[in-house]
Image: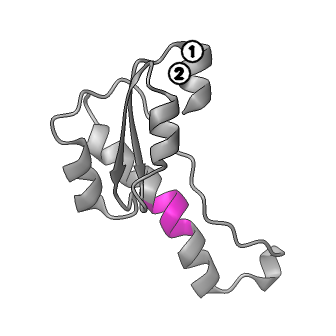
Amino acid sequence: ARHLVETHGVRDLLLLSRSGGDAGLVEELASAKVRAVACDVADAEAVAGALRGVPVTAVVHAAGVLDDGMVESLTPERLDVVFRAKVDAARNLAAATEGR
């Protein structure tokens, strides 16, 4: 977010995170219109709701779930946790912004 605003001049930014974001970061980036909204991007309905009525010109997806391990040690349960934040979220963002 900081890089987009400071380096690329982005002036309107919507940050989605399960926690609702970092109020300090929003305040720090006061030169731009930055909004932080609590939203689990792995939940398709939540994503659609958060983006409803919001003009979208770009999406940056930075998933934050980490579960290190060798491929052989990853169980279906561990993959589900990681894929939910990465793959499901990316799919939901793509669907919610399709045609925009």
- Is 85 a magenta residue? yes
- Is 87 a magenta residue? yes
Residue 85 rendering spot, x and y as whole percentages: 51, 63
Residue 26 rendering spot, x and y as whole percentages: 45, 37
Residue 43 rendering spot, x and y as whole percentages: 32, 64
> Which amino acid lies under the numbered mark 1 shown in the image of this protein?
His
Q: Secondary structure at mark 2?
A: helix
Q: Residue furthest left?
A: 53
The residue under the point 81% across, 75% down is 69
> Which amino acid lies under the numbered mark 2 shown in the image of this protein?
Val
Left or right: where does residue 92 sit relative to residue 7?
left
Q: The N terminus is located in which quarter?
A: top right
The residue that label 1 is drawn on is 8
Q: Are marks 1 and 2 in contact (CB under 8 Å)?
A: yes
Left or right: where does residue 82 sit relative to residue 41?
right
Residue 77 rendering spot, x and y as whole percentages: 58, 86
The residue that label 2 is drawn on is 5
Q: Secondary structure at mark 1?
A: helix
The crowd level at tag 1 (other Cα within 10 Å; few <14, some 14-19, many 20+) is few
Q: The C terminus is located in which quarter?
A: top left
Magenta extent = 83-88
